[in-house]
Amino acid sequence: MTARSATTDRAVVPPPHTLREYAFLGDGERGALVGPQGDVAWMAAPRFEDDAVFSALLGGRSQYRVAPVSRCTWGGSYEPGTLIWRSRWVTDDGAVVESRDALALPADEDRAVLLRQVSVTRGRARVAITLDPRAGFDTQPVTALKRHDGDDAVWTGRLGALSLRWTGAGDAEHHRQAESGRLSLVLELAAGEQHDLVLEIGRGTPEHWGRPVPARVAWEETSARWAATVRRLPQAWSPPQAQHSLAVLHGLTSARGAMVAAATTSLPERADAQENYDYRYAWVRDQCYAGVAAFTAADDALGDCAVRFLTERLLADGPTLAPAYTAAGQPVPEPRPLDLPGYPGAAAGTGNQVRTQFQLDGFGEALQLFAAAAERDRLDDDGERAARVAVDAIASRWREPDAGVWELDTRWWAHSRLAVVSGLRAWTAATRGASHHHDPAALVLAEEVLAETTRTCLHPSGRWQRAADDEAVDAALLLGGLRGAVALDDPRTLDTLAAVQAELDVDGYVFRFRHDARPLPQAEGAFLLCSYWAAMTEAALGQSVRAVSRLEKALAAAGPPQLFSEEFDPVQHQMRGNLPQGFVHALALEACVRMPALLSTGGSGLR
């Protein structure tokens, strides 16, 4: 192997790719997106909700790129059950180059450690490497950049309020005249050779971090941690995708227990619709979906994380529970624009307006999570106290209008009421045993809420309607039967499913609701979690062929890295929205694990 510095001062930042081509690296405390040109196009540091240090995804100049110099084609895959990503390129002359990338485990809350291992498996190749991080969403280049000579030369520098240390690139050239901290070099590798790069960005200074961990040791520990974390799922409908979704959920979940909704901000759901949100926070609803899915898959460690986070928030905030928090349990910051071009079709921003909303369904989802934990004997005394707080909050607030599951205008949404009925029923059923505090009043409350919801939100045709003042059908109303607010074979469930199939289905993908008279795909993308809800409901009701087809279509919406965003455009076959979307992976996991049992009993095991 030989290395030499690059000879050009012109930094080439790869243009944005379609979302389906990005891979996700995550360690629970922060996440990075890697594009097909070996470009780390996004990473906030040191935590998910902090300012980005790589912002090319949103039009910034910052980047960390590893790719062959010559013309090449791209592919890649994850090592099974991990978020260790391998990019693979085949060059003009037949050389095969790989970059093995991961965020190191165990994760340090205050310091990101990004591992990149470049290798050539066939032929000989020149590999270009460029590092140009910029703190504060691309506003602050590296300063005080210094090379430290020794057995393994390293670079250190300041990155706004953070520090940087880069090991393995001692021969890199610093492009001072480019008015940045950009470093670059070219490796020349023959078949069988590899080269390790370790980038650390975080609080404190390299002196306080201690000596760099050898790359070999970091890789061994990271691989071992993934092997111990993501369990092999037995008899899942689609084992690779189910296990991968489980890995994604772990990669989005902090050691504090909080799971962020996605790793990114401002990826548009629709071009120029200004529906570009910051999802780098922990939503109560998403956390509950993930926890229920984890317990369904017998991943008690991940389920316990969700229970711990929700327990802390309910005991602290009670009936004023916010819809979302930072991973540290703090209020979500106010929305503010960013001075970046943004991903094509949307402006860039951070923060989220959800911080001011009331969402009743969160209390019901929390009770469903606590019930799932109790059934696996994973609920402690604090968890039971938090569940009783949720019951009391429902009793005092269920008549209030709220923003609902889709976080729209404040109304009397039917789904929110059905969610709390499901939660109250599940909690009552789970706590009938002697080891739990049984609360029969919760069941009485469930009947009261259901009776009023039926009176005000039952459409004349017999199905559920969106709200007391909105007769439209909504895919979220499928949860009334799926989660047990009413029986699966209840006419209200059957009629709602028929309406969803007739009005909200396009080529097997399910939309949330109809915005207006336009064709559904012109208004927005299909919501993938709605497809999973529909598939599970259909399987349980004996519609096996339809259920299997829908599940397979939803799974096929992922790109080569097998990630899901919130929405999928069934016309252009493109993903829309932030990436990866945790609650979609949660429902994919649950559907994959539950589908065999649902299909085997479909229609025969209904309540």
Image (cartoon, grey):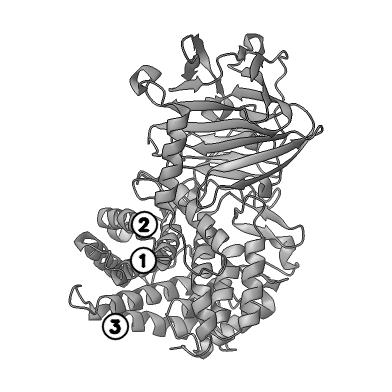
Q: For the N terminus, give its image quadrant.
A: top right
The disc, 1 or 3, on the residue closer to the chain's N-terminal end is 1
- Identify residue type, mark 3: Val
Q: In the picture provided, is 2 more to the left or to the right than 364?
A: right
Q: CA distance from mark 1 to mark 3?
A: 20 Å
Q: Residue furthest front?
A: 192
Q: Secondary structure at mark 2?
A: helix
Q: Position of residue 538 (x, y in %)?
A: 58, 80
In the image, residue 572 above or below residue 156? below
Check disc 3 and report the residue beneath it.
444
| Gap in angstroms between the C-alphas marked 3 and 2 | 27 Å
Q: Which residue is mark 2?
A: 306
Residue 254, x across and y down, in percent: 39, 46
Q: What residue did someone put label 1 on? A: 369
* Residue 223 percent across, percent down from the top left: 46, 42
Quadrant of image for the C terminus? bottom left
